[in-house]
Structures are given as structure tokens and as C-alpha cells.
Amino acid sequence: MALIDHLLAAYADLLLQVEQKPPDLVQVTALASVLHSFYNGVESIFIIIAKEIDGAVPTGDRWHRDLLEQMGMANEFREAVLPLPIQLQLQNYLAFRHYYRHAYSFFLRWKELRELVLPLTAVWDQTRTVLNQFAARL
């Protein structure tokens, strides 16, 4: 979680700038990288929970989506990690992560990215709170 905090702090100025003025290509590319890194960081936390508590990380072609869904469900070892609203928000970041890994950066459009970039800090704040609450219950 500290690494995600560091990521967002490192790009805080850019995140504030794009609230006022649309970014150029270089800034869009940087923002896309931030979104990708953000979800990778969140997913790394989920992998730890799946391995250490659930005893299994999903496999197969859909393992990223299955992992996110696993975090939204209670099981015999734990309560649900994520409430549905946060799980649904994170699905959008997961979908972008997949797109980003297979696209050239010059195809990225601010119109689409802004829906993920502008609420990013708030989404992380909510996710961090839920993760801290989960950890406190362990």
C-alpha cells in the first residue's frame, strides 16, 4: 500500500494539472502508466491475500478478473475483502490495465482516460480504507 501511496504522491502535480487542462501526449502516456501501475499494485495486494489467507490464486485466462471477484466474496477463511461498489470501480482499472498492455500509447485518448484518472485518488483512498479495515479484522 505504501508503494501505491508513493506512486500517487510522485504524480500528484500531474494529477492536479489535468483537472484544469487536458494533457498532451506525453502526459497522457504518463497517466496511462500510472493507471497501469496503480492496478498492478492493488492486484499484488490481492495476490498476497489469495496466497496467504485463501490458499489459492486463480489460474487460467481469466485469472485477473477471477482474482478481483474472489476479493469480493467471503470464503471459509475470511470475510469479503471488497464491497461491491469498490470491486466495480476496480474492474474499470483492470480493464484499462489489459488494454494498456496491448495498445500503443498514441492511441490513448484523454476523453476515455479522464474517467479513470480524475477519480483515481478517491478510488485509492476508498480501497486503502477497506484494505486497512480488512487487515484490522484479521
Image (spheres, grey):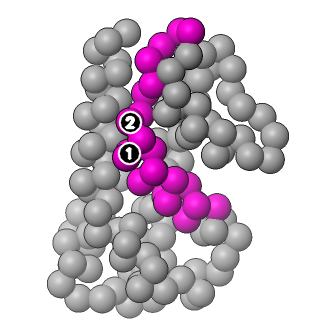
Q: Amino acid at mark 1?
A: Ile
Magenta highlight range? 76-98
Q: Which residue is depicted at the point 43% across and 62% down?
A: 34
For the point 18% across and 84% down, which residue is it? 20
Q: CA distance from mark 1 to mark 2?
A: 6 Å
Residue 101 belongs to magenta span: no
Q: Secondary structure at mark 2?
A: loop
Residue 132 in the image: x percent, y percent?
Answer: 29, 26
Image quadrant containing the N terminus: top left
Task: Please give the name of the residue rendered at 56% of the width and 9% of the height, measured from the top-left corner.
Answer: 76
Task: Please tell me whether mark 1 sits on a helix, a strand or a loop.
Answer: helix
Decide: is 86 above or below 8.
above
Rendered position, 133 above or below 59:
above
Q: Residues within 10 Å of mark 2 (few under 14, many from 20)?
A: few
Between 54 and 14, which is closer to the camera in this rendering?
Answer: 54
The disc labelled 2 sits on which kind of residue?
Answer: Pro
Residue 134 in the image: state x and y as whole percent: 35, 21
Residue pointed to by mark 2: 83
- Residue situated in front as seen by the camera: 63 or 6: 63
* In the displayed structure image, the side of residue 81 where residue 120 appears, left or right: left
The picture places residue 31, in percent across and down from the top left corner, at: 41, 71
Which residue lies under the disc numbered 1? 86
Which quadrant does the C terminus fall into? top left
